[in-house]
Image (cartoon, grey):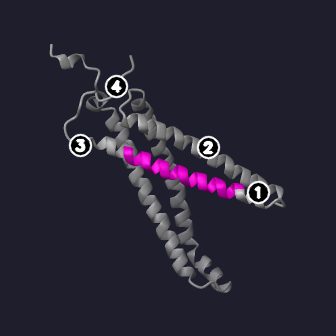
Amino acid sequence: MPLGAFSDQPARARGPMLWRIVVWMLLLVSAFGSLQYIKHMQNVWGQLRDNPSLQPAELDALHGMLGWDAAYLLVVFVLIVICAGCIMRQGWARPCMRVAAVLLAIWLLITGYLQLRDLQAMGANSAAILAQAQQQGTAGAAQMLARLQRGYQLALLFKAIGCIGSLWLTWKLGDPAVRAQFRTRR
């Protein structure tokens, strides 16, 4: 037998490993998202600190936002750890990444559906929104509404790309050639 048969190093694939690039992108997007959640938490905390005379309903809403931000931050941290383990081709990270990618795809589908529903409602009510803005004397309401709709459309496009990428990553990490690249724990 060749000496390489006893190596505990993972098998090397020929050519670029696109799945690793997708995992790197997911890691970078997760890190950026964690910074956004931290910034939002700081803003909410500042609102709680600077406004001692808030109503109980407002306090509950701000505490709820803090709770959701903390939960999202925890999920993003776990995703970052899984991505790092997957990039280093640790055996435990491959099945974790497959589960995380499926859950991410489901989350993107649900939030994309909700966003699409909001976009459709905004389109159906655009005439009423513009009329109300004109009554209030808001200049540029049509441009603001168009920019908001474009933002929603762009977000839906990114969610669709992310969903397809997550499902592709789940499929690719199940491939025997990719599976052989991961180190297993002894």
Considering only order in the chain, which callout, 1 or 3, is on the residue closer to the N terminus? 3
Foreground disc of the pair 1, 2: 1
Considering only order in the chain, which callout, 2 or 4, is on the residue closer to the N terminus? 2
SS at mark 1 in the image? helix
At x 19%, y 37%, the residue is 14
- The residue that disc 3 covers is 16
- The residue that disc 4 covers is 183
Q: CA distance from mark 2 to mark 3?
A: 35 Å
Which residues lie in the magenta part?
24-45
Give the left or right position of residue 1, taking residue 146 as reference: left
Q: Amino acid at mark 2?
A: Ala
Q: Amino acid at mark 4?
A: Arg
Foreground disc of the pair 4, 2: 4
Q: Amino acid at mark 3?
A: Pro
- The residue that disc 1 covers is 49
The secondary structure making up most of the magenta span is helix
SS at mark 2 in the image? helix
Q: CA distance from mark 1 to mark 4?
A: 48 Å
Q: x, y (%) of residue 140? A: 56, 83
Foreground disc of the pair 1, 4: 1
Observer-nearest residue: 6 or 104?
Answer: 6
Where is 102 relative to 44, above or below? above
- The residue that disc 2 covers is 71
Considering only order in the chain, which callout, 3 or 4, is on the residue closer to the N terminus? 3
Q: CA distance from mark 4 to mark 2?
A: 31 Å
Where is 25 relative to 116, above or below? above
Residue 51 falls in which quadrant of the image? Answer: bottom right
